Image (tube, grey):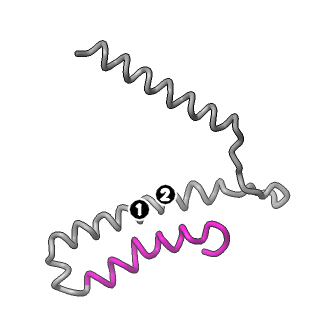
Amino acid sequence: MFGPMGWSYWVLVSCNLAFPLTTLWVRRLRTNMAFMFFLSIVVNTGMWFERFVIVVTSLYRDFLPSSWGTYRATKWDYMIYAERLGFSRRYSCCLCASCP
């Protein structure tokens, strides 16, 4: 709830609980199709943040307080990422060229 990743918890609570409950009390909003579509996007975002809170915040810190720190990517990490993007782009181009 608090700390470096506390913001994600509060986004989760506001998207899944606070915003839908406060707006669905109004009949005019409840029957408006455009607003209900917007509310479904907000709830979907909240569901994504629920998974984010479960996975990322549990992996954010190790169990040992001596190894707590923030991950910083190095140039090698960025180079591997760029390589993966290049390979997938090349294979996509080869697939598009071979399948007319």
Q: Which mark is residue 37?
A: none
User: In the visual, does 48 lie left or right of 43?
Assistant: right
Q: Give me the C-alpha separation between circle 2 and circle 1.
A: 7 Å
Residue beneath label 1, please?
47
Query: Measuring 56% from the left and 54% from the top, which residue is drawn there?
Result: 55
The image shows residue 65 at horizontal and vertical percentages of 81, 61
Which one is in front, 1 or 32?
32
Which region of the structure is painted magenta? 1-24
Q: Main secondary structure of the magenta part?
A: helix
Q: Quadrant of the C terminus?
A: top left
Query: Measuring 68% from the left and 45% from the top, which residue is drawn there?
Result: 73
Quarter location, residue 24: bottom left
The image shows residue 76 at horizontal and vertical percentages of 69, 34
Residue type at numbered disc 2: Arg
Residue beneath label 2, please?
51
Question: Label 1 near label 2: C-beta < 8 Å?
Answer: yes
Residue type at numbered disc 1: Met
Which one is in front, 4 or 18?
4
Q: Quadrant of the N terminus?
A: bottom right
User: In the visual, does 73 lie left or right of 1?
Assistant: right
